[in-house]
Image (spheres, helix red, strand yellow):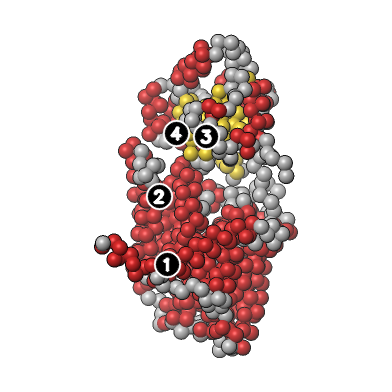
Amino acid sequence: MTYTAAAAPLSADLSSLVILMILALAVPIVVSRLPYIRLPIVAGEIIVGMAVGRSGLNLIQPDPAIEFLTFFGLAYLMFISGLEIDFNVLLRPLKVAEGQSFISTLISHPVAFGHLALGATLVGGLLFSTFLQQAGLVGSALLMAVIISTTSLTVVLPVLKESGLLKTDYGQTLLTGAVVADFVTLILLSVAASLFVGGLSSDILMLLVLLALVAVSYRMGKTVTGLKLEFLETLLGGTAQLGVRAALALMLIFIFIAETVGAEAILGTFLAGVLVSLLASRQRSELHEKMDAIGFGFLVPIFFIMVGVNFDVGILLTNPQGLALVPLILVATYLLKGLPVLALRLIYGWRETLAASLLLSTQMSVTIAAAAVGLRIGAISETVQSAIVLVAIVTSIVSPVAFNKLAPSPPEEENRKKEFGILGTNKHARLLATNLTAQGYRVTLLDSNRRKVEAAQREGFNATWADIRRPETLAQDGQEFRFDGFIAVTGNDQINIEAARVFSEGLGTEDVFAIVHDAKHVQLAERLGIRAINPFTASVGLANYLLRNPGETALEKEAFQCDDVEVRSPDYTGVALRELQLPHYLLVFSVRRGEERLLPDGDTVLQEGDHVLVVGPKEAVKEWRGRMGRREPG
């Protein structure tokens, strides 16, 4: 009875939330049917929000619950933005390569580029805002310059993710530019507001306290994660989902801290995302997928739709001065933010550069928050605020569409040769390298013995020197080793484990293995989160297979192939392994579904997109690949 009574008052308010979720469901479907426009989903969500909100049909009536979900959607999006930062790209050394000028080197470094572009925009924005102040349109030139200088990380991130460019160097450069712009302008916003209302206050010092708390939390987090407590690792999946719970708790803690010290809440959530990104290490990709599902499946669409819902075009239509201000601010935004980005032409083509210029001119969340602050302290009028919000909405629709038309296509994962690194140049390493190279993969042998490296090179292997005991040697001319997979096969277990740890945690390689001979070292590797392969147990497994298949001699002669095959054919989607007629002597080792790895049995049902690891005679593997790769015509 208590539950029913408590729930009843909410039933009248659920209609708006139901409409929101129906729109959130419909927008991606409709957008996907408009391939020629290539309208980003976030732009579609803003447009439908305007259609059903104050400027349109007025079907959605914001209430405290929806306002909270809108705020939480924005906070969550900033959190994901911090989580997406690749610190291997950001923290790479700034070195001038041979034949490259110092300016080109600065532009090619994401952090340096972000600061240079923002600095140029702030200078131009201050000149433009001084003109507006002298005209009596704004009360604070510095605050207006900050508003113009913002870049919407909350739009840039979804657009890059949707376009498939987020993990490329190009995508990380744009993401970093947006991160720098939002992070610095959030801090400058507090400075500008304090100066306008009567000088710098203690709130500025409290920002330093917030940053100090991030540093302390990082050190504490590294200590906890370094303990490798087995009982905690067992709670990462299933119904516990400890990693997701910890990330959400950390985000809410930093929201509370940020508001307590007088900073913007979205700055706190962004810093929380950065902190989780630094601490997650090997579990980062899996955690990303789970957090993305929560955000982009529920909270983020509510935020973008409500941006459109809350905008009231009537305020501008009844004020000619405010309406005339819109094109002026719009042109200034594209010029002041877009022109500095053209420096990317030193390292990219014109299409990529123009696309970047347009996307980094996008404004949204921080812009709207800054305009609200300006209105609250009396630095801008309600008309100017409405003009700023309309400009932000226009850029968040026009810029992503133009970006999708001009931006380069994402790298085709199927056509790109995967690259693998092997530590060691012994016979096992060479045999593995020969097998992988024959299957079309690019393989690099690494060794700290220069004579062995030279010997391998003379035999035709791609080999290079690297002292794994000194991780800094993994950078050659500022370019770190980037592999899709890595395995250490030296005769020293400890070196193999340390190498795997360096590549997993230090270089961000997702698929990392180590050959480990001693059972005690296998346990150590597992505590460190390293996937260990014990040659003895592997040999027993192979012998077990041969005993059960005595007619198979191909494996004994090493005339076999191990391959990862993606399931594409609809004929085999939704079918259990026991129902398949597997090619003769083909053995299914594992099934990878997204970030989850399954140990298959006869009841394992294949799904489209699954990656099935098989081993067997070359012809059998070839036949299996042909079956799984077939698609229906059209």
* Amino acid type of the residue tagged 1 in the rendering: Leu
* Amino acid type of the residue tagged 4 in the rendering: Ile
Task: State how far apart marks 4 and 3 are (Cα).
Answer: 28 Å
Which residue, as the protein is rendered here, is positioned at the far left? 2
Is residue 317 among the parts visible in the rendering? Answer: yes
Check disc 1: other Cα within 10 Å, few if <14, some if 14-19, many if 20+: some
* Amino acid type of the residue tagged 2 in the rendering: Val
Task: State how far apart marks 2 and 1 are (Cα).
Answer: 27 Å
Is residue 171 among the parts visible in the rendering? Answer: no
**Residue that label 2 marks:** 244
From what the image shows, is residue 616 above or below residue 229? above
Which residue does the image show at 49% across and 52% down from the upper left?
Answer: 292
* Amino acid type of the residue tagged 3 in the rendering: Val
**Residue that label 1 marks:** 14
Q: Which of the two labelled residues, at mark 2 and mark 1, occupies the earlier sequence position? A: 1
Image spot of residue 206 (x, y percent)? 36, 67
- Secondary structure at badge 4 equals loop
**Which dot marks residue 605?**
3
Which sits in the foreground, 175 or 50? Answer: 50
